[in-house]
Image (cartoon, rainbow, N blue to C red):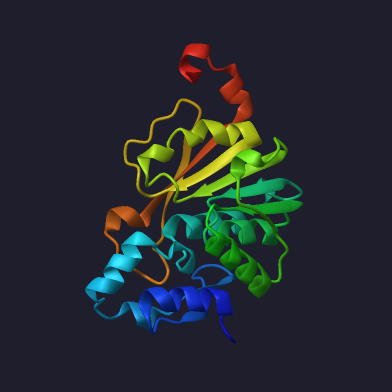
Amino acid sequence: MTPPPELQQALGQLLGDARLSATPLPGTDLSLWLIDADNMDRAFSPEETRRILEEPPYWCFCWASGLVLARWLAERPEWVRGKRVLDFGAGSGVAAIAAAHAGAREVVACDLDPLALAACRANAELNGVTLGYSADFFAEADRFDLILVADVLYDRANLPLLDHFLDRGREALVADSRVRDFAHPHYRRLEALEACTWPDLAEPAEFRRVSLYHATREAHARAPAAVQA
């Protein structure tokens, strides 16, 4: 299979000879266009390192939290079956694609990065599903049953988004492996599961343990005003 030209060109500008490969995800029946694992088994030049830090190609990895969400939805399709779903910060689109596979009525992949949306389109085609696309979460109407969120809270500046998710969706399901002091009055922890980023980045063990958090708009609305603030 030939990698999507736009994505291959973007990756090549960052890492020279790096290639995209249609890669099966472990523990799922999904595949994504991901950076070939062989590209990661070498030392990067200082210039490559600088480019990666400035413009990380996060859309060509399946991060551990996204993989956990994909597996969770495959095993529990009732979370999305017949529902309208938005995947916030979609990246590769793995959670959105998993929701579509599990029978969601409509799935929108939302990401600010045009390359991420291009990756979502290519990966949706690879998996034979149809998605909608959005570059602006706050322009979306309040019409979703569920907001999916994976690997967004690594930047603590994003923590206030936890409340905004419930402005656009009746429920939110958040997967995160970075925040160790997660404390929000409207989110409860469902489970902690093991997974690794794919291809494997040999991340520390602490980043391979992904927690799932769930919140509902009803619980948020019932909370005292002082708590909501």
Task: Judge from the rendering whether residue 74 lies leftward or rightward of residue 182; answer left or right.
Answer: right
- Near-viewer residue (139 or 72): 139
Residue 160 visible at all: yes
Residue at point 54%, 17% (across, down): 223
Residue 207, percent from left and from top: 33, 55
**The quarter of the displayed image where residue 199 is located:** bottom left
**The quarter of the displayed image where residue 18 is located:** bottom left
The image shows a total of numbered marks equal to 0
- Near-viewer residue (43 or 45): 45
Q: Going by the picture, which residue comes out furthest to the bottom?
A: 1
Residue 23 visible at all: no
Task: Judge from the rendering whether residue 131 lies leftward or rightward of residue 73; answer left or right.
Answer: right
Residue at point 35%, 57% (across, down): 208
In the image, residue 52 above or below residue 42: above
Residue at point 67%, 52% (across, down): 108
Residue at point 73%, 56% (across, down): 103
In the image, residue 30 above or below residue 73: below
- Near-viewer residue (151 or 182): 151
Residue 84, percent from left and from top: 72, 46
Residue 221, percent from left and from top: 60, 20
